[in-house]
Image (cartoon, grey):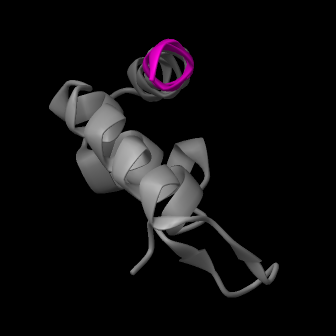
Amino acid sequence: DSLSADSDSGNLISHAEARALKHCMDGLNEGQRNSLKLAYFDGCSHEEIAGTLQAPLGTIKSWVRRGLQGLKRCLEAI
Protein backbone atom coordinates (compact mmCIF):
# COMPACT_ATOMS: atom_id res chain seq x y z
CA ASP A 1 0.00 0.00 0.00
CA SER A 2 1.58 3.27 -1.10
CA LEU A 3 0.20 5.10 1.93
CA SER A 4 1.70 2.75 4.50
CA ALA A 5 5.20 2.02 3.26
CA ASP A 6 7.98 3.71 1.41
CA SER A 7 10.15 0.85 0.18
CA ASP A 8 12.79 3.13 -1.36
CA SER A 9 13.82 4.72 1.93
CA GLY A 10 12.84 1.87 4.22
CA ASN A 11 10.54 4.16 6.22
CA LEU A 12 7.33 2.65 7.47
CA ILE A 13 4.44 4.55 8.94
CA SER A 14 1.94 3.12 11.36
CA HIS A 15 -1.53 2.09 10.32
CA ALA A 16 -2.91 5.01 12.35
CA GLU A 17 -0.65 7.43 10.46
CA ALA A 18 -1.67 5.89 7.13
CA ARG A 19 -5.36 6.23 8.05
CA ALA A 20 -4.82 9.86 9.08
CA LEU A 21 -3.01 10.61 5.82
CA LYS A 22 -5.76 8.94 3.78
CA HIS A 23 -8.44 10.88 5.68
CA CYS A 24 -6.64 14.16 5.03
CA MET A 25 -5.94 13.33 1.37
CA ASP A 26 -9.65 12.53 0.91
CA GLY A 27 -10.44 16.03 2.23
CA LEU A 28 -8.50 17.76 -0.56
CA ASN A 29 -10.07 18.75 -3.84
CA GLU A 30 -9.48 16.42 -6.77
CA GLY A 31 -6.78 18.57 -8.40
CA GLN A 32 -4.80 18.88 -5.19
CA ARG A 33 -5.17 15.20 -4.35
CA ASN A 34 -4.14 14.00 -7.82
CA SER A 35 -1.22 16.43 -7.98
CA LEU A 36 0.14 15.29 -4.61
CA LYS A 37 -0.27 11.62 -5.49
CA LEU A 38 1.64 12.11 -8.75
CA ALA A 39 4.35 14.22 -7.08
CA TYR A 40 4.98 12.23 -3.91
CA PHE A 41 3.87 8.68 -4.66
CA ASP A 42 4.87 8.54 -8.34
CA GLY A 43 7.81 10.97 -8.21
CA CYS A 44 6.56 13.18 -11.06
CA SER A 45 7.84 16.72 -11.62
CA HIS A 46 5.46 19.67 -11.81
CA GLU A 47 5.88 19.63 -15.59
CA GLU A 48 5.03 15.93 -15.79
CA ILE A 49 1.97 16.45 -13.60
CA ALA A 50 0.82 19.33 -15.83
CA GLY A 51 1.06 17.04 -18.86
CA THR A 52 -0.70 14.15 -17.14
CA LEU A 53 -3.54 16.24 -15.73
CA GLN A 54 -3.66 18.54 -18.78
CA ALA A 55 -3.55 21.65 -16.61
CA PRO A 56 -1.35 24.75 -16.75
CA LEU A 57 1.95 24.55 -14.87
CA GLY A 58 0.99 27.44 -12.56
CA THR A 59 -2.22 25.65 -11.62
CA ILE A 60 -0.27 22.49 -10.76
CA LYS A 61 2.15 24.44 -8.59
CA SER A 62 -0.79 26.04 -6.77
CA TRP A 63 -2.53 22.69 -6.30
CA VAL A 64 0.61 21.14 -4.84
CA ARG A 65 1.29 24.11 -2.53
CA ARG A 66 -2.33 24.40 -1.35
CA GLY A 67 -2.65 20.62 -1.04
CA LEU A 68 0.42 20.47 1.22
CA GLN A 69 -0.93 23.34 3.31
CA GLY A 70 -4.26 21.54 3.62
CA LEU A 71 -2.58 18.28 4.60
CA LYS A 72 -0.50 20.04 7.22
CA ARG A 73 -3.56 21.72 8.77
CA CYS A 74 -5.53 18.48 8.74
CA LEU A 75 -2.75 16.32 10.19
CA GLU A 76 -2.01 18.87 12.92
CA ALA A 77 -5.67 18.82 13.91
CA ILE A 78 -5.76 15.03 14.35
Left or right of 43: which side holds 33? left
Q: Considering the whole magenta stretch, tell me its main secondary structure.
A: helix
Q: Is 77 included in the stretch rendered in magenta?
A: yes
The N terminus lies in which quarter of the figure?
A: bottom left
Residue drawn at 26 percent across, 26 percent down: 28
> Does residue 48 appear anywhere in the picture?
no
Q: Which residues are magenta?
A: 71-78
Left or right of 65: which side holds 66? left
| Quadrant in the picture for residue 31 | top left
Q: Is 72 included in the stretch rendered in magenta?
A: yes
- Percent position of residue 22, x then y: 32, 49
Residue drawn at 57 percent across, 77 percent down: 5
Left or right of 21: which side holds 10? right
The correct choice, above or below, for 11 with respect to 27 in the image is below
Left or right of 49: which side holds 9? right
Residue drawn at 21 percent across, 38 percent down: 26
Q: Please give the count of numbered marks on the rendered protein.
A: 0
The C terminus lies in which quarter of the figure?
A: top left
The correct choice, above or below, for 1 with respect to 75 in the image is below
> Does residue 60 appear anywhere in the picture?
yes
Residue drawn at 27 percent across, 39 percent down: 23
